[in-house]
Amino acid sequence: MSASEIHNFINGEYVAARTTKSFDVIDPATEQSYATSPVSSAADVDDAYRAAASAFETWGETTPAERQLALFRIADAMEARAEEFADRESKDTGKPRASLVADEIMLSVDQIRFFAGEARHLSGMASGEYMKDHTSSIRREPIGVIGQVAPWNYPLNMAVWKVAPAIAAGNTTVLKPSDTTPSSTLLFAEIAAEFLPAGVFNVITGDRTTGGLMIDHKTPQMVSITGSVRAGMEVAKAASVDLKRVHLELGGKAPVVVFNDADISAAVAGIGAAGYFNAGQDCTAATRVLVHEDVHDEFVRELVSWTRENAKTGAPHDDVYFGAINNANQLAQVARVIDELPSHAQIDLGGQRQGQQGYFFEATIVSGLHQDDSAVQNEIFGPVITVQKFRDENQALEWANGVDYGLASSVWTKDHARAMRFAKHLDFGCVWINTHIPIVAEMPHGGFKHSGYGKDLSSYGFEDYTRIKHVMSFIGQA
């Protein structure tokens, strides 16, 4: 693909940014620039929010049925162009092209269809006389204009998680994709504009400065970000000045607890697949494994064997399990984690950058770590699985919960009562049992502690983009 110039998508059309600053969009598999994208300015942010505010005057008055139909049509159009989405996503992210349609593009289409259904399923308390001579009812209303910032690890999927529930509820949006992965989100907006009034869904590109301008702007009544803990804290602080609603999906450090009665071969296969998928660039990735001392050595041996055979990395059109790290900074971060491992850690496999071109890093396994080691406590966001040895349930639970994050977790055991105990006591927004990483649109995704607050997906995710109004009427005789 020859170099091209990316534009913002505002008020239903592509528009050149009102700025002279731009950056190169890099293909992580080749390290070559294939496009330039603007660093949108305050004027560009104003334009986008002005369009969204104007569109809300009419979109906020549409019926649930109208919004549902628009979303269904968007989903159908996206499905028809699934291969084009996959091409763009693969070039921006370096992901294996062969699996993208099934693993991510069609997942996004399904999630849009789910939120189309949610548009017509407004829940609330039953109307009634909770006070003598007065009838109360609940209205569930759109919030207004929403400012949204999406990450680079799942560009289209994360854009859908934000935009679909917001517009299904009657809001309008301005979304900034990551500076490294703008292409599929812009195609999403372009297709959506065929079925939505101009200004309902706007996309502006830029860097952290642009994101800050979006959060600080007076227009949005709510801001939503998927990103790092640092970014989430900055957003929450900035939004508090104007008392904006905040929706945060931040980092994770999922504990994967494997007991000595687990099916070790099944656990290894499931954990390996969930740990290396998308090069471990997933807030729920199965990369922090705690294994009972009785089966620890067996588990590590089998995981090394499974990884050698199955977890290959390489260019998007190669026969590989995962692709490149998304960007040079993240590659350097993953390499730094390995370089700074303590002396008691053991690298059982991998640990090196792969090749001279592209941001590729080998599938890596590290054992012998202590609970307070940085590699255990901090999110790596790369294809690195750490394995710790625990002695009993109490230690396993203490170590599992002993991080600042609280997004996802899993427990592997044949003991149902133990699984239920851990499901109760694991301080994470999701607990998987004898599996790890499956997500369905009907169930919520979101965490506790430094993993943020608010839910994506499900009816809970839809409700986050609504506000509740109590209406009370006097019905007694005058």
Image: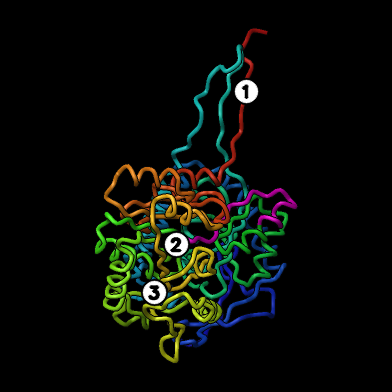
Q: Is residue 200 visible?
A: no
Q: Element type at marker 2?
A: helix
Q: Quadrant of the N terminus?
A: bottom left
Can you tell which mark lies on residue 472? 1
Instruction: Report the Cα–Cα distance between label 1 and label 3.
Output: 61 Å
**Residue 419 seen in render:** yes
List x then y, in percent, for residue 267: 29, 61
Work out whether mark 1 precedes mark 3 in sequence or the reverse, and give the earlier one: 3
- Closer to viewer: mark 2 or mark 1: 2
Q: Nearer the viewer, mark 1 or mark 3?
A: 3
Residue at 54% across, 77% down: 333
Residue contact at pointers 2 and 1, CB within 8 angstroms: no
Dot 1 and dot 3 residues touching (CB under 8 Å): no
Region rendered in magenta: 236-254
278 within the magenta span = no
Of residues 237 and 260, the one nearer the viewer is 260
Query: Front-most of 418 and 128?
Result: 418
Query: Label 2 neighbourhood size at 10 Å, few (<14), some (14-19), many (20+)?
Result: many
Q: Residue furthest top?
A: 477
In the rendered structure, which amino acid carries the disc numbered 3?
A: Ile
Q: Out of 191 and 21, give the one closest to the viewer.
A: 21
- In the orientation shown, which residue stands out farthest toward the bottom? 356
**Is label 3 or label 2 in front?**
3
Q: Looking at the image, what colour scheme do you see?
A: rainbow
Q: Where's the C terminus, which quadrant?
A: top right
> Residue under circle 3?
365
From the image, tell me which residue sits under label 2: 157
Q: Residues within 10 Å of mark 3 (few under 14, many from 20)?
A: many
Which callout, 3 or 2, points at the residue further toward the start of the chain? 2
